Amino acid sequence: MALGSGRIEQLAGRMKAQGISAFLASSPITMGYLHGFFEEGGERLLLLAVHADGRVRMTCPGLTETQARRCGLQEVRSWRDGEDPFALVRELASDWGLEPGRLAVDDDLAAARLLELQRLLPRASFEAGQALLASLMRVKGDAELELLREAGRIADGAFQDVLGRIHAGQREDEVTGMILETMRRLGGVPAFCIAATGANSAEPHHHSDGTRLREGDALILDFGCSVSGYLSDITRTVAVGRASAELRQVYGIVLEAHRAGRAAIGEGVPCQAIDRAARRVITEAGYGPQFMHRTGHGIGMRGHEEPYLIEGNAQPLEPGHCFSVEPGIYLPGRFGVRIENCVVCTADGHASLNEEPPDQVLEVG
């Protein structure tokens, strides 16, 4: 089956089963996933509407109409700057009989737009539609998996490429630039990169800056790219120069936790079980409070999506679920270690979308 084929029909079937009249999409990712149309409306109203019977209508600015039709959208209603775009929403509601009715919206619909829609259609009820969409997006097909694997291969290649070029004295932002450019050269669209050294590596979402790498420092590299809209996400921790005994020890604990989490993956296993397995290793080693985030998140066209590997999420894993496994230990003011691979759940366990992390902390420079 071609990428994207049948998604409108699948969404419509789920809507009908749940008694939802229409789904309103505004995110380029949602519209791209459903119909191959990736465009941001910005300050202009742009909505892809899907009826429970499978009808689709695009409401968009006139300057977007040609691209919408090029993507195969048959029913496009456009408006020009200076006109009232919500007149087309009233027309849609009348044509489709959306009042009264249940209207699901994606999470990216701006609050101001939602409030205006509620004012225009007071007899309709609006509800979050992301769970409905996630029920489709979280299970990846073969074509999607191949794109995720390719994005993973590019991230792996970038890591191997830059290892020999990292050295003490470089700035964090120089390292990020090097990795981003390498992913681009290898065929990916760079999505993000964090380089965090020394005490900064104890900040899981550090913003890379002008901090210089020093001999003996830990260096966390967290980065990814996209291939045809599908993302990679990998984290490796290395030492700049010779690693201390403590860094080697903490790295070993995190690696054991990473492997324990992955060993727990299987069809029907609750998401929280993977978090528990990884967290148990770190807690028993005495670092429980220093692991403050979930073990993983789903990945696909969004960098963070369902399923989430976190305590309290009893959702069972299914073949085709793709997600990160990324335990970490963070010692404020000193250093941190995180190890992350993205994997896909399979009928007999899981398969990694990245090369395996090193058995011990690598020393670079």
Image (tube, helix red, strand yellow):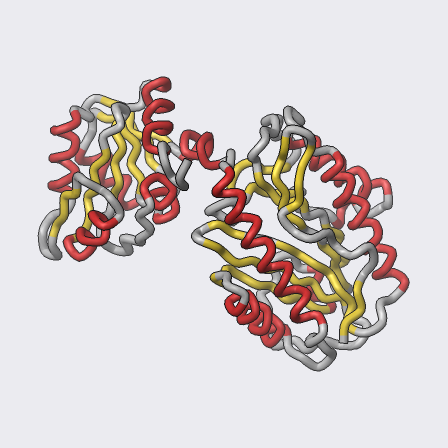
Eyeballing the image, is 49 above or below 243? above
Q: Quadrant of residue 315?
A: top right
Q: Is residue 349 left or right of residue 96?
A: right
**Residue that appears at 56% across and 41% down:** 298
Q: Position of residue 299 (x, y in %)?
A: 54, 44
Q: Give the x, y percent position of residue 258.
A: 75, 45
Name, please, the residue furthest toward the front. 1
Q: Farthest residue toward the left?
A: 83
Extreme-right residue of the structure:
245
| Direction from residue 209 to residue 70 in the image, left or right | left
Q: Is residue 172 visible?
A: yes
Image spot of residue 29 (x, y percent)? 39, 47
Measuring 28% from the left and 40% from the top, which residue is drawn there? 114
Relative to 14, 87 lies left or right: left
Residue at point 64%, 66% (across, down): 195
Residue at the outermost bottom position: 169
Residue 232: x %, y % from top left: 56, 53
Q: The C terminus lies in which quarter of the figure?
A: bottom right
> Total label count?
0
Q: Is residue 109 visible?
A: no
Q: Quadrant of the N terminus?
A: top left
Q: Residue at x 40, y 39 (%)?
A: 2
Residue sitting nearer the eye, 35 or 146: 146
Instruction: Quadrant for residue 364, please give it.
Output: bottom right
